[in-house]
Structure formats: structure tokens, C-alpha cells
Amino acid sequence: MGASRGALRLGVADLLRHPGRRRDETLEALLEDLRVLGSEVARRQPAHLEVRLESVNEAVVVRGTASVPWVGECRRCLGPVTGTLSAPILEIYETHPTEGETQPLQGELIDLEPVAREAVLLGLPLAPLCRDDCAGLCPRCGADRNQSPCDCSTDVVDARWSALDDLRLDD
Ligand SMILES: [Zn+2]
Ligand SMILES: [Zn+2]
């Protein structure tokens, strides 16, 4: 979405000229098309970033969090699940970055977008639950056991439990 392009690009000339200086920033931007197997960032919901920038030698250290609403599918009952994740950000920007470890300074600008996207991607739940005690779907008839218990035999579940018991015995 064009409106958010560059929303996470910040000028840091003041910091680079004054080692030790700090600056706090609160930012909002759309981080679109971020998804993992069980969830994705909610559409048209901006991410909220709270970061502290600190000038250290020739580099800028960024510390803070990126928060964003997500939507997903319960791994047991396949119903919708929503939540808000808060992902930690810790990054160093320097003129000559180390591949895979630090980020490039773009002249006197830093771009938080790739860092925020990576943090949020790592924070998305892979196998969310609609609630801790979700009863899930019956493996036989597909009934949602949260809504109504079905009359199917519980053999399948029993088999799973006994497999677990075997594992424990092997320990
Ligand atoms: Zn569920
Ligand atoms: Zn059933």
C-alpha cells in the first residue's frame, strides 16, 4: 500500500554526529503479506513500533518492539483465532554492515521495515489454539467437539494416548 511506503525510514544525522545520543520513536506502518503456516498479519491493520535509537561509535543501535494484530486458524478445530503479537527488535545499523548480522546505513537514513518484517514473521504463531482447552474436531465424523460431543468411539484418541505412554516407558 503506497501510503505506508517508507514509513519506517528514519533520518539519523543527529545521532551520527553525537555519539551517545538517544532518541525514542513511535511509528506505525502496514506490514503486509506476512504469513506462516498457521497465521498471518491481519489485513490493513498497521503494526505499531516503539523503538529507542542510540548512537554508538559510527553505528546506530535500535531496540524496541513491533506489535501487530494477527489472524489464524485453530490447529485443533480449524476455527478462527486472533491475537496481537509483540516481537522484540534489536538491530545495529552501520555504514559497512556485516552480512546477516547488521543492517546498512543508507547515508544518514535507516530503514526499519526489513527488520520489523523479520521480527513479526518470527513472532507469528505456527500452530495457534482458539483456547487452551479447545476440544478440536472428531477425527471420525468431523464434528466440532466444542459445539457438541459426537457418539463416535474414542479409539483413535485412546491409541494416541497409548502411543504417548509407550514413549514415556522408553525414557
Ligand atoms: Zn479450536
Ligand atoms: Zn465423531
Image (tube, grey):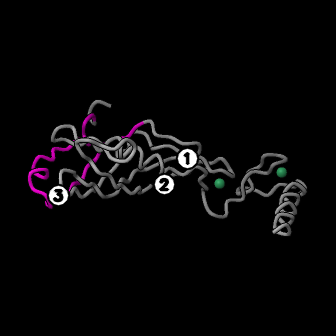
Up-down: is 51 above or below 140?
Answer: below
Q: Which residue is mark 2?
A: 83
The answer to whether marks 2 and 3 mark residues whose Cβ atoms lie closer than 8 Å is no
Residue for badge 1: 72
Q: Quadrant of the N terminus?
A: top left
Residue at the disc numbered 3 = 23
Disc 2 C-beta below 8 A from ligand 1: no
Say whether marks 1 and 2 touch (CB < 8 Å): yes
What amino acid is labelled 3 in the image? Arg
Left or right of 10: which side holds 169?
A: right
Q: Quadrant of residue 112?
A: top left
- Residue stretch rendered in magenta on the structure: 5-32
Say what secondary structure mark 3 lies in. Answer: strand
Q: Are marks 1 and 3 in contact (CB under 8 Å)?
A: no
Residue 101 screen position, x and y as percent: 37, 47
Q: Amino acid at mark 1?
A: Gly
Q: Is residue 53 magenta?
A: no
Dot 1 lies on which element? strand
